[in-house]
Amino acid sequence: MTELVLIRVTGADKPGLTANISAILAQYDVTILDIGQAEIHDTLTLGILAAIPDRAESAPVLKDVLFKAHELGLSVRFTPVTPESYENWVAGQGKSRHIVTLLARTIEAKAIAAITAIVAEHGLNIDQINRLSGRVPLAQNEENTRACVEFSVRGEADQSAMRAQFLQAANDLGVDIAFQEDDKYRRSRRLVAFDMDSTLIEAEVIDELAAAAGVGQQVAEITERAMLGELDFNQSFEQRVALLKGLNGDVLQGIAERLPVTEGAERLIRNLKALGYKTAILSGGFNYFGRYLQQKLGIDYVYANELEMEKGIVTGRVTGKVVNGERKAELLRELAAQEDITLEQTIAVGDGANDLPMLSIAGLGIAFRAKPLVRENAKNAITTLGLDGILYLLGYRDRDIG
């Protein structure tokens, strides 16, 4: 009867290793039931689950593999696999799959230990571990580095409990840990919607306007309470805009030109455009600044509030429907329909309480450098890296993108 053998080969990587081993197996009409190869620091690990037909005895096959491995300077191990064990392995392919993504400036062993302990506690199997970030020189300044490791896990688990544990571990270790389903939508997302203030830019525009109007402290206090979810957004927004009454509109251009774009934003959007994604700004801020960023970054859609002006002077009012949390979610739905995609194919990114409605309905909701309330209620969060860390959550490697 057919004999099943797991062949594990390790050693210094060099061209032709896999070709040499597989050529020997081909001579004996071996069927490959599974194969995997990894390379770490020029060291190869190759695994082959071979089904050796009954017409070919296993001894000559394994002897030839052993001799070739020795000739190539490799180590090789053979492990018999029972049919029962193989069938159990096959049966596991229908289980749910998830992706756990670790993001940090550098990867510490304690972060890997924490993640794998949580995965094991919930009875999940780790199928693959891949480094998505590029190679980093030892002398590189940590502030400029990006590090990401992705775990592919399989099995049934309490997702809410796992997310809570990952969030706690991330807070304790100063890293980010994302947890998402590995399904067809992860590879077919097509629209990314961003909040603007404190997300695409490292500022709250209304605070900048208030400073120019001489009411900075009053507006900043209202803004902070609104972002923390302590105040109704519409009421707080009206209060803040009213304080801007009398501001000369000439200052808007200067403020726009000084807005600091968030780390990684330009790289993220440049790559999203190259990959065919549509992008949108859904902001509780103002259209003037949203349109400025649209031109600067190449954003496809902008929806924000229109600051009313009369004879070049701010009136202290906005025109049209206020873009609050509910309106952001409504706009995300409308854009998805316009682009002929499902909500599962959308991504939403924001930092404040008024972003939670759109984060909750998007296929991938990301709290970016967010307030504690938002991090706790969003499915995923990025705090340690820039906005381009989102590319890792989509499964892209540094070598794949610019």
Image: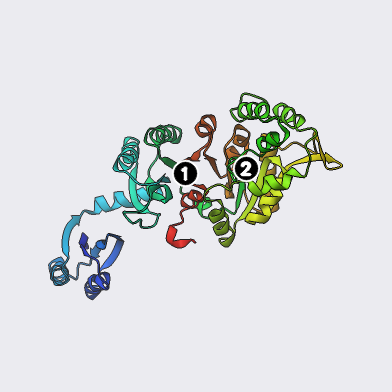
Q: Residue furthest top?
A: 230
Residue toward you, 149 or 255 = 255
Q: Quadrant of the N terminus?
A: bottom left
Q: Is 68 drawn above or below residue 222 in the view shown?
A: below
Camera sees residue 333: no
Mark 2 neighbour density, 10 Å: few (under 14) some (14–19) many (20 or more): many
Of the residues tagged 1 and 2, which is closer to the observer? 2
The residue pinned by badge 1 equals 180
Q: Residue at x 62, y 49 (%)?
A: 342
Q: Left or right: 147 with respect to 117?
A: right
Residue 195, numbered label: 2
Q: Position of residue 365 (x, y in %)?
A: 55, 42
Amino acid found under the numbered disc labelled 2: Asp
Q: Residue at x 59, y 54 (%)?
A: 190
Foreground residue among 163 and 228: 228
| Residue sitting nearer the eye, 341 or 374 | 374
Q: Residue at x 33, y 56 (%)?
A: 137
Q: In terms of image quadrants, where is residue 233? A: top right
